[in-house]
Image (tube, rainbow, N blue to C red):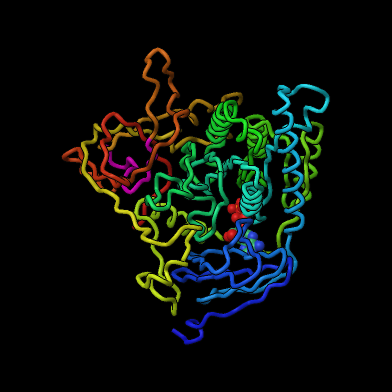
Amino acid sequence: MSERLAVPREWVLNAESEYRFELDPGTSVAIKLVRGQAEIFGAELVEGKTYFFYEECKAAIFTWQGCTIEITGQPSTEYISDETAMNAYGNIHLALEAMRIRALDRTKSNQPQGYGSDSQSSEPPRVLILGPENSGKTSLAKILLNYATRAAQDWCPMLVNVDPGEGASMLPGTISAAAIPAPLQTSTPAHRLGRAATTAPTHMTSNSLLPLAYWYGHAEVKRNPLLLDRLIRNLGENVWDRHEDDTQGRVSGVIIDTPSSFAANTGGNADHRQALIKACVDAFRINVILVVGHEKLNAEMQRTYAKHITVVKVPKSGGVVELDAPYRSRIHKYQMHSYFYGERFTLPPGMPSLTSAPAAAGYLVGGEQIMDFTLAPSSFVVPFGDLTMWRIGEETMAPSSALPIGATRVVSEMQPIQVDPSQAGSGLYNAVLALLASPNPDESERYDEEILDLHVVGFIVITNLDIPNKKMTVLAPTQTSLVGKTAIVGTFEWEE
Ligand SMILES: Nc1ncnc2c1ncn2[C@@H]1O[C@H](COP(=O)(O)OP(=O)(O)OP(=O)(O)O)[C@@H](O)[C@H]1O
């Protein structure tokens, strides 16, 4: 390792500029704010503390007023840019903030929602972010959420992620909603939108989220858009119910991050794309649409929604990195590993070790004091009969275009099909499954497709199938009884 890497390097940033960096696999960097003010995707850095970044993190340290930062370790790419989109993003935040304050005033004056001529303008912000691949949608969502939580009003905005390829604070394949009480930190792309409490070691709980999630099971929207539509509507209903009894949460608003396939047809069907945007608009009663870096989509949204919804064209940041498919699948792997095994990273060369107490006291990962990030999952053997496993829709369906004219396959796309683990080719070996909440205890309230509407309570992996003895080996965060539980398999595979 070269001597240069061991020596911390100082970078001086002028006001309204940012230091952008990208990391190679297996490397990490430490960044300390030496003096001045700085933030990362809207979350402020504490002066004198050392922040760690790893697992191919790509990010920027931005400063409004100027600062000096100290870097230890060598990113594969690093540079300073004074051409950022932060002014535009800051202005959007101010407009959303004004909406929150008006909505709060209205609540305090006890006027019901929808009352009076200015009812539209006193609604809290419910924002849908749309844009093509690598336009910076997730980064913008994070910046807006982080600015809201810093506003000294105790806002607790709701982050909704309907991009199953992203996974937010859960695993990829899920869509979720989580109230965000404090700025979302940045350290690894495996947890760009926070860490769910279920996977975090206990000492990290101060920043952990309690998301409500549904399992779609695939990274790609085109795989089963009808299912995604239904899950989005389920999520919307839940958020709406929750906000009925939570004025502060309701007034803080909702910010929705979407997949790029909502913006452009990526081999899918144009009707599905529009239907999914509509599902979000209806389910979350969207009143602001932000379109990042896409003229044509902006025009389309203006045409379709501008009568009732404020549609705003937003510039794309020049710092956004083009993420390719192999990178995205490595991130999925980091996410799945960190759910079961926690996080491991090596300090950059030249850093005093974690056992050196005085130095480690100033070390922060994801905004938390560094200690031990590893988890000890359980691997145990259970009879096949303990767990009922389902797959949604058939694997070998003919495409809709191959069906007779007038026929639809709505039922089969949404149909839960029980998976028999004793059948060769069940697809369960090394599959990631979502464990679902219990169905309605009242039998008379049950319905055929109920499992589509049950939220996720955890995840397991089947690491071995012993067909002659009708037993399987299950990897789970803790040893737990699976008797009577229901799980759904998707298309995510576990890799050691
Ligand atoms: N200003 C910046 N400087 C450096 N990296 C950045 C900056 N803004 C975003 N990035 C990085 O660029 C990558 C893509 O950004 P982001 O995920 O926000 O885009 P997206 O439009 O949501 O992507 P997707 O195609 O997955 O929908 C991420 O790794 C993000 O951390």
Q: In the image, is 71 to the left or to the right of 263?
A: left
Q: Is residue 329 above or below residue 391?
A: below
Q: Nearer the viewer, residue 256 or 487?
A: 256
Quarter holding the N terminus is bottom left
Magenta residues, start to end: 423-435
Number of marks in the rendered image: 0
Q: Please say whether residue 120 is visible from this viewpoint.
A: yes
Q: Point out residue 259 in the picture as x, y percentages from the top left corner.
A: 60, 46
Q: Point out residue 34 in the picture as x, y percentages from the top left corner.
A: 59, 73
Q: Please say whether residue 322 is visible from this viewpoint.
A: no
Pick out the residue farthest to the left.
Answer: 469
Q: Is residue 60 above or below residue 335?
A: below
Q: Point out residue 19 in the picture as x, y percentages from the top left corner.
A: 64, 70
Q: Nearer the viewer, residue 404 or 347?
A: 347
Q: In the image, is 161 to the left or to the right of 305?
A: left
Q: What residue is shown at x 78% (from left), y 30% (from top)? A: 120
Q: Nearer the viewer, residue 354 or 130?
A: 354
The quarter of the displayed image where residue 43 is located: bottom right
Looking at the magenta stretch, what is its main secondary structure?
Answer: loop
Q: What residue is shown at x 72% (from left), y 43% (from top)? A: 97
- Magenta span has 427? yes
Q: Is residue 136 above or below residue 243?
A: below
Q: Point out residue 195 in the picture as x, y percentages from the top left corner.
A: 47, 49
Pick out the residue farthest to the bottom.
Answer: 3
Image region (quadrant) for ligand 1: bottom right
Q: What residue is shown at x 51% (from left), y 68% (from top)? A: 50
